[in-house]
Amino acid sequence: ETGVTQTPRHLVMGMTNKKSLKCEQHLGHNAMYWYKQSAKKPLELMFVYSLEERVENNSVPSRFSPECPNSSHLFLHLHTLQPEDSALYLCASTPGQGARWHEQYFGPGTRLTVT
Amino acid sequence: LAKTTQPISMDSYEGQEVNITCSHNNIATNDYITWYQQFPSQGPRFIIQGYKTKVTNEVASLFIPADRKSSTLSLPRVSLSDTAVYYCLVGARSNDYKLSFGAGTTVTVRA
């Protein structure tokens, strides 16, 4: 248990569906992240929120839409995805202070399959 | 972000000590060195972080020489459950929210 939860753990969706991934952190952290990890590839940073403000959008297609309503919750809204979007989507949080920016706590991930 | 280089894979046996060295020749004065562990289909787990000399916790030790151009993660007496990918990251201490995980080192522990 890292203090970061993600739901659902598994998701299968068609290319025309709309779904959302949810992340919640119980650590009192100030920053939250979305990462994508495709099979046998390094983690790819997607979005970063610091104090509920988006500070990074790493050239992510618009079919992925993040939302951070407060410092404890982060969503990733999905619509009209492509099969190549199938991957493990990971949420992380960090205290966001000094060197502790690099002390990230990850959730278990959502395994997404796009059919 | 300073570029890091680490071996792609390492094999070991249960009970042995595993040392993974990461090169970061362009490390900046205010950069910290951080290591993560990742099991298949799970998120990475923060293991240890250091700036210089030696840092030890209940999981591992991190050795950083005086020139800080490399670092070594030491895993004492590994078990089968230590089989994972280990990532070395280097970055600045202030508002450096980006992490670059790279390919990491796949450590395989055999019985």
Image: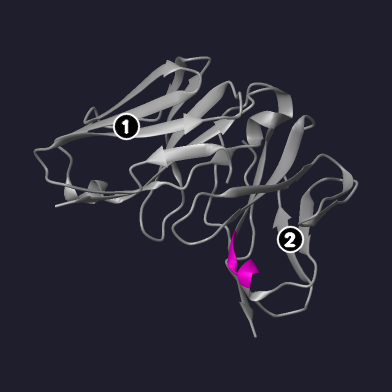
Badge 2 local density, few (<14 within 10 Å), some, or many (20+)? some
Q: Tell me if residue A25 comes above or below residue B70 in the rendering.
A: above
Residue B29 picture location, percent across and down: 80, 31
Chain containing the residue with disc 1: A
Residue A15 magenta-highlighted: no
Q: Secondary structure at mark 1?
A: loop
Amino acid marked by disc 1: Val
Judging by the rendered image, the residue that carries numbered circle 2 is B21
- Residue at horizontal 60 percent and vertical 37 percent from the top: A104
User: Above or below — where is B80 with respect to B96?
Assistant: below
Residue type at numbered disc 2 = Thr
Examine the rendered structure and indicate whether residue B65 appears above or below residue A67: below
Q: Circle 2 sits in a helix, a strand or a loop, which is it?
A: strand
- B65 to the left or right of A111: right
Q: Position of residue A25 (x, y in %)?
A: 52, 30
Q: Is residue A53 left or right of residue B13?
A: left
